[in-house]
Image (tube, rainbow, N blue to C red):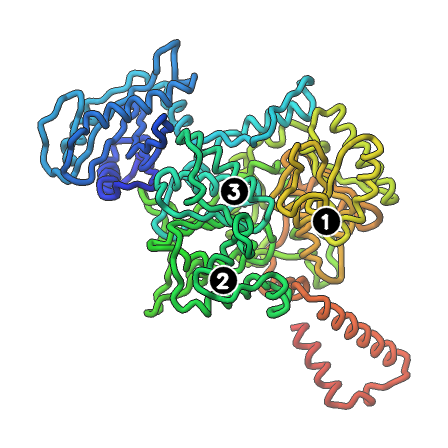
Amino acid sequence: MRLLVTIITGTTQKPTSSDLLKSFFQRHDELDGYLYIGYPIIGTVDGAYPIDSLWVSPDKGLVIFNLIEGKNIDGYEEAQDDCANKIEAKLRGYRQLVNKRKLCVEINVITYAPALMRKVDCDEDYPLCANDNNLLAQIETLNWNNSGYYEALVSVLQAISTIRKGKKRRETIKPESRGSKLKALEDSIANLDNQQSRAVIETVEGVQRIRGLAGSGKTVVLALKAAYLHAQHPEWKIAVTFNTRSLKGQLRQLINTFYIEQTSEEPDWDNLHILHAWGAPGGGERTGIYYTFCGTNNLEYLDFLSARNRFGSTDPFGAACQKALEEATDPKPIYDAVLVDEAQDFSPAFLKLCYEMLREPKRLVYAYDELQNLRLQSLPSPEEIFGVDEHGVPNVTFRPSEDGQPEQDIILEKCYRNSRPALVTAHALGFGIYRKPVGEDDSGLVQMFDQSALWEEIGYHVEAGSLEDGKHVVLERTNKSSPEFLESHSDIDDLIMFKQFDSKEEQDQWVANEIQTNLTEDELRPDDIIVINPNPVTTKLNVAPIRALLYERGIQSHTAGVDTAPDVFFDEDNASVAFTGIYRAKGNEAAMVYIVNAEACFDSFFDLAKLRNQLFTAITRSKAWVRVLGVGPGMDGLIAEYKKVKDHNFTLDFVYPTKAQRDHMNIVNRDMSEAEKRKIQKTKGNAENLIQELESGNIYLEDLGKDTVNRLISLLKSKEG
């Protein structure tokens, strides 16, 4: 049966009648439009007023369903008046739905009480339906003469919230300045799109994940989802957690703004907690998820230094979480919902720890960026992350998508931060798509997904060829996944610029000059600009000369996390230009991004994938213009790769590597400790000395022993095969 009504299922305190209402619409494919369960929430002088259900149809107009779970219908007429008046007041705030003083949307209210089973006598002005036949008959009496307003009505309902940042109003004078272009961009993405809005509302009684690229709105969706759940269930204990410390203020502001917008009240911060993942003793702002878990279950808590000393530097936090899980024999649940942002930064052990802190039905929402780490594959499957019960049955399994059921696995494929050219360039350089091969066996590629389907899931379209091992493929982004307005405001050569300098001094002078122009002529503000030095270790030293040049011109600047608190990125007054290494840049964005000393990301004997990831992440911080700058031949190499991206009209044109090739990339580009690097360097040096001695005749193969020579030959042959 073809379902024409799109059903969006939020959280509700009337589950039985809600499910029966959804079933009714699923059985009647002659009806169309959108049915919302548990949405919208209306802000009133008395606080939040949730609407049980709302249906909007091009033929019938807007229908509010007042749902009754049991058989008590006392006061249902007053309830109908209340919800109709509140919806009307909300819609009158949108000029596109009003003609002069008249609201052009027909508002109808039906009370649906399926537990009654039989029709009850009622006032015709206050329809009361007890079964499907009553309900269908009542719906058939409705007719909307102003159906031309349908699209505008749907747009208003789906927008949910305006998500402009809470910065001072952008004032511009020149219509073609960068500031004016930026204002237009910000206005264009102020409202959530349909996909994002649905992700906010749809609530799973269990585990839900939200995936998407940087700039697809995951953090916004997660914050608004927390506020929505808090408004619907103010008695729930809800936690929102994250990795990048500077995200805390952003999450709090988004939640606070949305909650006030929807309910006209402040959130109850005693029941809604925004917590860093790790945490530390001291209470208040220092409290974190892991610290809370240890305290609640009377376990040993490890700080960063203790965890690193005990488990090494690879993933001390993940190891500490795993230890806590193993020692917690009967974990105590303390939350009704936990929402995790930046899940790609965490090991599965942390997500399992969050899961164990939840009361049934264990409402865990985790959002992550498929490419933020640009590593070889996504997080493990939910079956692998959350384990099995005593019978070997997975604790969490994502069911296939079903009509009328909330999505468990949401993919936000639209990218609202980066323009198509910038995003494709970042991917091309990050993966080494157009990198010149070194030797016969080298494809040029630095890394690649094991799961080729991920490319389509993050918004790429196969323009030619096929996404199969060993096959040629051309991938492109479409207007659907990369909106055209993100690139149409400026020429390509202004959106993205790669520039090589003869010296670092020349580069630094150029950056200082450009920033001065941005502030004095382009109508940009200091908080519209980020300068990124990819290598976090050298950042403070490398950016000092540019900052000195700006200081001489009266331009304030700061190095994030050095001149500011660890959880502050832009300064409080937004009057200072931010300089940063790549790790603090993560999670932040700006209109104009300068990436300095980028030549360091071109090539390396070690950690090439890591360096390319730094460049990828830096480029994707830009929501308008990006400048990739560097010195010497390494920069020439990056420019050559970018030229190929541009020559291919910002598509990815390559041969998909086989599994054997991917395994080789994984080995070559694996993460290594400093000790491992030194050992390989030493061994490589010894091997080169041995070859030179053999070539010069100073020693002979026979000197090495027959067994050693045979083992060496056998090893080399196996590698060739």
Quadrant position of the N terminus in the picture: top left
Disc 3 is placed on an element classified as helix
Type of residue at label 1? Answer: Pro
Which residue does the image show at 90% across and 83% down from the upper left?
Answer: 698
Q: CA distance from mark 1 to mark 3?
A: 24 Å
Q: Which residue is mark 3?
A: 219
Q: Quadrant of residue 639?
A: top right
Using the image as rendered, state which of residue 274 and residue 282 is in the foreground: 282
Residue lying furthest front in this view? 282
Does 30 sit left or right of 556 as displayed? left
The numbered mark, 2 or 1, whose residue comes first in the sequence reads 2
Type of residue at label 2? Answer: Ala
Does 137 sit left or right of 333 as displayed? left
Disc 2 is placed on an element classified as helix
Q: CA distance from mark 3 to mark 2?
A: 22 Å
Do tag 2 and tag 1 residues touch (Cβ < 8 Å)? no
Which residue does the image show at 38% across and 27% down from the upper left?
Answer: 154
Q: Return the x and y of residue 441 as percentages of the image width and height.
A: 70, 63
Q: What label sits on residue 349 in the rendered view?
A: 2
User: Is residue 525 visible to us here?
Assistant: yes
Q: Nearer the viewer, mark 2 or mark 1?
A: 2
Q: Residues within 10 Å of mark 1 (few under 14, many from 20)?
A: many
Disc 1 is placed on an element classified as loop
Q: Quadrant of residue 505?
A: top right
The numbered mark, 3 or 2, whose residue comes first in the sequence reads 3
Q: Return the x and y of residue 689 as percentages of the image width and height.
A: 85, 76
Using the image as rendered, state which of residue 467 and residue 684 is in the foreground: 684
Q: What label sits on residue 534 in the rendered view?
A: 1
